[in-house]
C-alpha cells in the first residue's frame, strides 16, 4: 500500500485543496476502506460554501460522507468483514446508551459519531460504525448505487415518521436528489404524488418515479398560485393529506403549511440556514388541527431499509448519478449540481488530473 493518498482538504469556506496526505491505519475493531465512489451531496456543497461546525469542527479536514469502496485492511478483532469485501457505510452512528437513544430516538443521539472523509482515497471506519452501520455490497449493485443508501435513509426516516396511508395524496416540494427519493417512497406507499420543483431532467425522473402531477415552478413562480393549483387537484379542493418540504427554504416551509388540507400533516425535511425563522398563522394551526413534523437524520434501521431498497432496485439508484469524475473536479461537480446540470456526480478519489 502507498504511504500517501489523494485527498480533498477543507481549509475554509470555498477553500478546498487537493493534496497528498498520509494513508490512515485502522485500529482495533476498525476497517480501512479504499473509496471507489464518493457522491456529491447538498450538505457537502453547503459545507464547501459556508463551513459546517458539526461536520468539520476543526480545519484542515477531509470531508464528504456518501461513499462505498473495498476493504483493504481490518483492525484487530474484526471477524465479520474481510479484505476484498465491497462495502458501504452510513456516515453516522448513535451510541445506543444516551437519553434519546433509550427513548428510541437514535437520530437525536447526544453522542452521535460522525465520520467524514469520503473525498479521499482511503477512509477509516470506526469500530462503533463497523458493528452497526456497515453492509457488504452485492455484486449486482455498483459502488455508486450503494453509496446512495445514506441519503435514502434520511428519506425513509421522514416518511416513516409521518405515516402515509394507502390512497393519500402527498405533495413534495423540491426535486433535488432527496426530493426524488421522497417521491419514489411516497409512490411505493400507495400515495398519489404531486410534485412542485424545477429542472427538466429532474421533473422527468419524478414522473418515472411515480409522480402523478408535476408543477414546474419556473412556469408558476407565484407560491399563492401554486398552492391554489395543488389544492384544486385533490381532496375536493381541500388540499393534500401530506405535504413534504424538501427544498430547504423558509418560504417553502410556509408554502407547505398553507397548502396542506385541514387535519393534514406537514413534514419539514429540508434544512434551512441556521437562525432562520418562519411565520405561521396561529388561527390556521389551531382551527385546522395541523400536525407538523420536524425530521432529522436517520436511525440504523432506516439505513438498513434504504440499503435493502437499493439492492432490490425498488428504488433504482442508477437514475441518480450522471457520471464519475476524478477527485480534482469535485468543485466543478458541485457547481454543475447547483446549476441543475445533474442530480449527483460520483468522484473517484484514486484519479486526479
Image (tube, grey):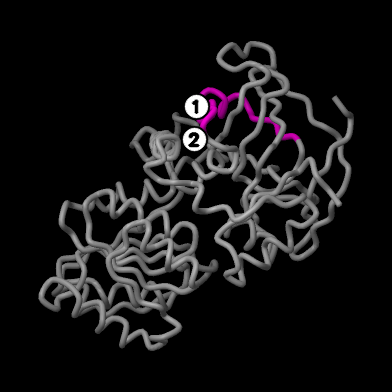
Q: Residue furthest left?
A: 236
- Which residue is rendered at x = 71% and y = 26% of the image? 32
Camera-nearest residue between 324 and 298 = 324
- Which residue is rendered at x = 37% and y = 56% of the image? 209
In percent of width and height, residue 119 lies at 72, 46
The image quarter in which residue 300 lies:
top left
Crowding at mark 1 (Cα within 10 Å: few <14, some 14-19, many 20+): some
Q: Is residue 66 left or right of residue 5?
A: left
Quadrant position of the N terminus in the picture: top right
Label 2 vs 1, first from the N-terminus: 2
161 up-or-down from 331: above or below = above
Residue of label 1 = 132
**Residue 110 is one of the magenta-drawn residues:** no
The residue segment tinted magenta is: 122-140
**Residue 139 is one of the magenta-drawn residues:** yes
In percent of width and height, residue 342 lies at 58, 63
Residue of label 2 = 94
- Which residue is rendered at x = 47% and y = 66% of the image? 202
In percent of width and height, residue 122 lies at 75, 34
In percent of width and height, residue 194 lies at 29, 68
Amino acid at each position: 500500500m502507498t504511504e500517501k493518498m489523494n485527498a480533498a482538504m477543507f481549509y475554509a469556506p470555498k477553500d478546498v485543496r487537493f493534496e497528498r496526505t498520509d494513508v490512515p491505519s485502522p485500529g482495533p475493531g476498525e476497517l480501512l476502506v479504499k473509496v471507489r465512489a464518493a457522491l456529491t451531496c447538498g450538505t457537502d456543497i453547503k459545507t464547501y460554501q459556508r463551513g459546517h461546525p458539526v461536520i468539520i469542527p476543526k480545519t484542515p479536514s477531509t470531508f464528504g460522507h456518501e461513499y462505498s469502496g473495498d476493504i483493504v485492511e481490518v483492525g484487530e478483532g474484526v471477524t465479520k468483514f474481510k479484505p476484498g469485501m465491497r462495502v458501504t457505510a452510513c456516515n453516522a452512528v448513535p451510541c445506543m446508551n444516551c437519553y434519546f437513544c433509550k427513548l428510541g430516538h437514535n437520530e437525536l443521539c447526544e453522542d452521535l459519531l460522525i465520520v467524514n472523509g469520503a473525498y479521499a482515497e482511503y477512509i477509516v471506519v470506526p469500530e462503533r460504525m463497523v458493528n452497526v452501520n456497515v453492509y457488504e455490497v452485492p455484486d449486482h449493485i455498483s459502488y455508486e448505487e450503494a453509496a446512495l443508501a445514506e441519503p435514502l435513509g434520511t428519506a425513509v426516516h421522514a416518511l416513516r415518521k409521518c405515516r402515509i396511508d394507502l390512497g393519500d395524496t402527498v405533495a413534495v416540494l423540491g426535486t433535488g436528489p432527496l426530493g426524488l427519493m421522497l417521491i419514489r417512497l411516497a409512490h411505493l406507499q400507495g400515495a398519489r404524488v404531486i410534485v412542485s420543483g424545477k429542472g427538466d431532467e429532474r421533473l422527468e425522473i419524478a414522473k418515472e418515479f411515480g409522480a402523478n402531477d408535476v408543477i414546474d415552478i419556473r412556469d408558476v413562480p407565484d407560491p399563492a398560485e401554486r398552492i391554489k393549483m395543488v389544492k384544486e387537484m385533490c381532496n375536493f379542493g381541500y388540499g393534500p393529506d401530506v405535504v413534504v418540504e424538501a427544498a430547504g427554504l423558509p418560504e417553502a416551509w410556509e408554502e407547505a403549511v398553507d397548502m396542506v388540507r385541514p387535519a393534514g400533516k406537514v413534514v419539514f425535511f429540508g434544512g434551512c440556514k441556521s437562525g432562520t425563522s418562519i411565520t405561521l398563522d396561529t388561527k390556521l394551526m389551531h382551527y385546522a388541527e395541523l400536525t407538523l413534523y420536524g425530521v432529522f437524520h436517520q436511525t440504523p434501521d432506516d439505513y438498513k431499509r434504504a440499503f435493502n431498497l437499493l439492492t432490490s432496485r425498488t428504488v433504482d439508484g442508477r437514475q441518480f448519478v450522471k457520471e464519475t469524475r476524478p477527485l480534482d473536479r469535485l468543485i466543478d461537480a458541485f457547481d454543475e449540481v447547483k446549476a441543475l446540470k445533474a442530480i449527483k456526480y460520483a468522484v473517484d478519489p484514486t484519479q486526479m488530473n
